[in-house]
Amino acid sequence: MQLARVTGTLVASVKADGLEGVKLLIVQPLDRHKQPEGGSVVAADGVHMAGPGELVYVVGAREASQALPNTIVPVDLAIVGIVDAVEELRSGAGRKEQP
Amino acid sequence: MKVGRVVGTVVSTISSPAFEGRRLLLCDLLDASGHADGSYLICVDTVGSGAGENVLILDEGNSARQVIGMSTAPVRAVVVGIVDELTVDGEAVLRD
């Protein structure tokens, strides 16, 4: 699983079977310092509550479909959680960073 | 499987049900010389590992679901062990 920032939404009225009702969002993958890494990609919203600007974590490959109600769907990236905070731990001391 | 180092935790209130009550760790991945290779993974903790510890990471969905005991879960990366010692070419690369 990786961090990503939701940057947009995507609407497609013609979709493969099983994708009806699945919200599609544009996400920018991030490195662990929350800097953009690679190009933007489309992810299915597995939590139904993610929106532009939010810091999320995503799961790729076959496991992405497990986040959706119908698990036999052609999806290779899904948002599985919205990040409240990333706490960098250094020698036992926690430093909380806001998303 | 991969070797990583726990560098942080990820706090998430709104998540897929499979993540409820689970601890998410931010782990740097290590190369064969024990240094961070620049990539990272967010992993579900199954062994109670903590900051700075070197860990064994599984990054494959089917095995991950088996480890957390769920037949359907959008989980791929799990921490499955704490590394005591790693030796490469006869040299100790990591030691607890």
Image (cartoon, rainbow, N blue to C red):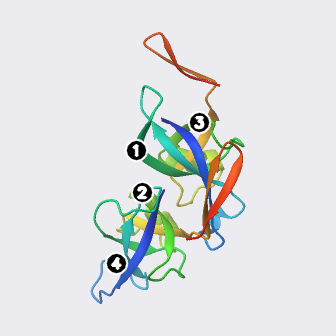
Q: How far is mark 1 from mark 3, CA to CA?
A: 16 Å
Task: Name the disc covering residue A31, or none.
Answer: 2
Q: What is the three-letter code of the residue carrying label 3?
A: Val
Q: What is the three-letter code of the residue carrying label 1?
A: Gly
Helix, strand or loop for disc 3? strand
Decide which of A17, B55 is in the foreground and name it. Answer: B55
Task: Name the disc covering residue B38, or none.
Answer: 1
Q: Earlier in the sequence, mark 1 or mark 3?
A: 1
Mark 1 and mark 2 in contact? Answer it, CB < 8 Å: yes
**Residue B52 to residue A19: above or below:** above
Q: How far is mark 4 from mark 2, CA to CA?
A: 33 Å
Q: Earlier in the sequence, mark 4 or mark 2?
A: 4
**Residue B17 to residue B3: above or below:** below
User: Could you tell me which residue is drawn at 48 percent across and 45 percent down?
Assistant: B59
Mark nearest the camera among 1 and 4 is 1
**Residue B69 to residue A67: above or below:** above
Q: Which residue is farthest bottom?
A: A13
Q: What is the three-letter code of the residue carrying label 2?
A: Asp
Q: Residues within 10 Å of mark 3 (few under 14, many from 20)?
A: many
Q: Residues within 10 Å of mark 1 (few under 14, many from 20)?
A: few
Task: Name the disc covering residue A17, or none.
Answer: 4
Measured from the top left, where is residue B73 in percent x and y? Answer: 56, 60
Residue that badge 3 annotates: B55
Image mark 1: chain: B
